[in-house]
Image: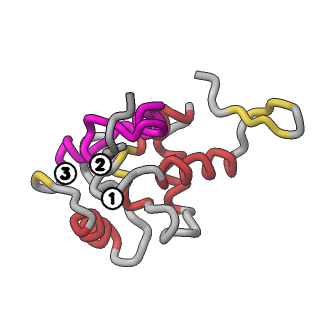
Amino acid sequence: MPGLLVLEAGRVRKARLQDIYESVYTIISLVPPGLVTTYGSIARLLGTSPRIVGRALRDNKSPILVPCHRVVRSDGSLGGYSGPGGVEMKRRLLELEGVKFEGDRVRPDHIVDAGRLLSPDNLISGSSDTPGVGGGQKHE
């Protein structure tokens, strides 16, 4: 995968780190309460590494607008959380939003692939078989 490209002033260029950060924040903003996505899922979508995604989350300056607590490791474990209260607070926030756990991992039925958040079905018709994604009536 060539990585993220940006169209700027009529020219295509390779994305800068700030462009990738902004894309990460946009994707995370699409994750509904009650679900999470993974660092790896976002990284695959953007053609970057999960570590870059983690760094973007660590540097998030708008935690109220960008719900970085809704991103976990691919195995469902919580990973890091640089907000007040650390990982314990991340878990509490997720539980308040309805995310269910099996031990110290998010249940698989509460993890959504970031690419599904951008699927036409979810954006246009609001339909989805994933709990919390889309959720509207299927338009025919």
Residue labelled with disc 2 = 132
Which element type, helix, strand or loop, lies under badge 2?
loop
**Circle count:** 3
Q: Amino acid at mark 1?
A: Pro
**Which numbered disc flags the more N-terminal residue, 3 or 2?**
3
Residue labelled with disc 1 = 33
- Neighbourhood count class around disc 3 (C-alpha, 10 Å): few under 14, some 14–19, many 20 upward: some
Residue labelled with disc 3 = 105
- For residue 41, say whether it is visible: no
In the picture, measured across the screen, residue 139 lies left or right of residue 16, that is: left
Q: Position of residue 87 (x, y in %)?
A: 30, 66
**Which numbered disc flags the more N-terminal residue, 3 or 1?**
1
- Neighbourhood count class around disc 1 (C-alpha, 10 Å): few under 14, some 14–19, many 20 upward: some
Which element type, helix, strand or loop, lies under badge 3?
strand
Q: Amino acid at mark 2?
A: Gly
- Neighbourhood count class around disc 2 (C-alpha, 10 Å): few under 14, some 14–19, many 20 upward: some
Which element type, helix, strand or loop, lies under badge 1?
loop
In the picture, measured across the screen, residue 44 lies left or right of residue 93, that is: right
